Image (cartoon, coloured by chain):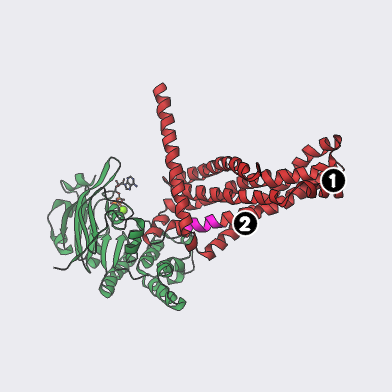
Chain colours: A green, B red
Amino acid sequence: MAESVISLQGLEISFGEKKVLQGVDLEVKKGETMAVIGPSGTGKSTILRALIGLLEPTGGSVFIEGQDVSHLSEEEWNGIRKHVGMVFQYSALFDFLDVGENVAFGLRQHFSLPEDEVRKKVDDLLADVGMLDAKSMYPVELSGGMKKRVSLARALAFGPRIVLYDEPTAGLDPIRTMNISRLIRKTQQKHKVTSILVTHDMESVYTAADRVALLNDGKIVAIGTPEEFRNSDNPLIRGFITGEEITGATEAFR
Amino acid sequence: MLHDICAATGAFVLNFCQVTGQMMLLFIDTLKKLKHASIRETLRQMALLGADSLPIVLLTMLCTGMVFSVQTAKEFVALGASNTVGGIVAIAMGRELVPVLTGVVVAGRIGAAIAAELGTMKVTEQIDALRVMATSPVQYLVAPRFIAISLMMPMLIVFGNFIGNAGGYFVAHYYADIGSYTYLNSIKRFCEMYDVVGGMIKGVAFGAIISIVGCFKGLHADKGAEGVGLATTASVVLSIILIFIADYFMTVLLYVDK
Ligand SMILES: Nc1ncnc2c1ncn2[C@@H]1O[C@H](COP(=O)(O)OP(=O)(O)OP(=O)(O)O)[C@@H](O)[C@H]1O
Ligand SMILES: [Mg+2]
């Protein structure tokens, strides 16, 4: 069995009294894309924020490439973050930089590449996400879906070994969604990246993911391949995939 | 009732200590990261906030110089001390009025802008995005602003002194009939370079206060747009209070028993 690049062991995160994650166990193997699905507000973004050191676990532990990163200092995290890309749910583009500079940010900060190489990388990525025409626009001039795609390009630009996608296709039209899902697949195959893909969109799970985990009430309640999920008769899974009224499922999603 | 008051006072004191401590930590962290601050960004910030605040600083100082001169000139002429007016205006402006008022104006103009800018970045997760991209917000955002304001303050103060004294002279000359030679000679006799330099030193400290408070309040903004608004107001109020407190101690250090 391949080693786990990302490993969550009984991860707990609370905000004050409120326990959001209540013992999440998850192993993501090298080169694997793990989709995490689940109802709104169960803590999918919270998992990603714990994985990049924006939130400190209140219990359990987080391992990245074998290293226990549960309680690292900011300096120690920065060493790890140079290999991890993250697509924020609400894009979080730097509004003082234009699209091209946003994408180039990681490259400029941590690699001293010649200018034409940076430009080529940025152009390639923007072309991949269909945003090359908008290269010199500022984030305020972009629509939500456009920001999302720039944010994706920014996360991939510096060649991370691990990528965390927080709903990269939310708010995109079906064709763009398909393109982005394929891009995620392509990135995984070409650069052997390990990734976690948080999404509400089953199509992109089928296209891009190797395995899926269903998060509900702060716990992983089911895990399997997209095929297994598609054919599952677990009411929670069926309810989530089809959106149908299924006894037990809708209660859980309230 | 009494219990409530005690609890509220206790909470206030605790909170005050915590905020002060956190701000000291930010200050120390900023000092550590000064040498890694981007020179380009620092220069850009200096140009931005210099251009932003120079007009209003000049206007404030011109008015202050004129008012001060109106208030003193006629009285002193009546007392037969017309040869002291220039010196008095220059010393008061150089030591106290220009540095403190420039500090207040810059806190309102620049400190507020910084708190709003960083606060917006905080609530839109841009600060998180910086951290995720292994870039320290202190190094990338705070350090350049800290250097820029701390260096711009003394420069603004030099300009403020010029225009303030010019305003003082103008009023003394045309309103109280004090001759040009008398006025300028009075400045020369009573005022030393140190009166202005001390004010500039104060300016550096006030600049440090304004930038650290503005950045701190911005970086700790939460709860969306409302939080940004609160951070902005809080940063101005706190900066001004700290400037007045610092001014007292710096005056004692710089000018008493010198
Ligand atoms: N900073 C915070 N302070 C307090 N509570 C928080 C904070 N961040 C998140 N929460 C709570 O944690 C829970 C999980 O939030 P999270 O953003 O991880 O949900 P999510 O699964 O990503 O939902 P969505 O699909 O809507 O993005 C929510 O109930 C939210 O109220
Ligand atoms: Mg989320």
Q: Amino acid at mark 1?
A: His
Q: Nearer the viewer, residue A94 or B193?
A: B193
Dot 2: chain letter? B
- Specify whether B20 is left or right of A83: right
Residue at 20% over, 46% down: A252
Q: Amino acid at mark 2?
A: Gly
Task: Point out the image quarter for the N terminus of chain A.
Answer: bottom left
Q: Is mark 2 within 8 Å of ligand 1?
A: no
Which of labels 2 and 1 is toward the front? 1
User: What percent of the width, then of the height, locates residue A212?
Assistant: 20, 60
Dot 1: chain letter? B
Q: Residue furthest left?
A: A233
Do badges 2 and 1 share one subunit? yes
Q: Which of the labelled discs sits on residue B173, or is there none?
A: 1
User: What percent of the width, then of the height, locates residue A11?
Assistant: 22, 51
N-terminal of the pair, mark 2 or mark 1, is 2
Q: Is residue B144 magenta?
A: yes
Residue B112 appearing in the image:
no
Q: Residues within 10 Å of mark 1 (few under 14, many from 20)?
A: some
Q: Nearer the viewer, residue B4 or A38?
A: B4
- Specify whether A245 is left or right of B19: left
User: What percent of the width, then of the height, locates residue A235?
Assistant: 14, 51
Q: Which residues are magenta?
A: B141-147
Disc 2 designates what residue? B50
Q: Residue furthest front?
A: B257
Q: Is residue B132 magenta?
A: no
Q: Main secondary structure of the magenta part?
A: helix
Helix or strand or loop: what does disc 2 sit on? helix
Residue A189 position (above or below residue A212)? below
Task: Point out the image quarter for the C terminus of chain A.
Answer: top left
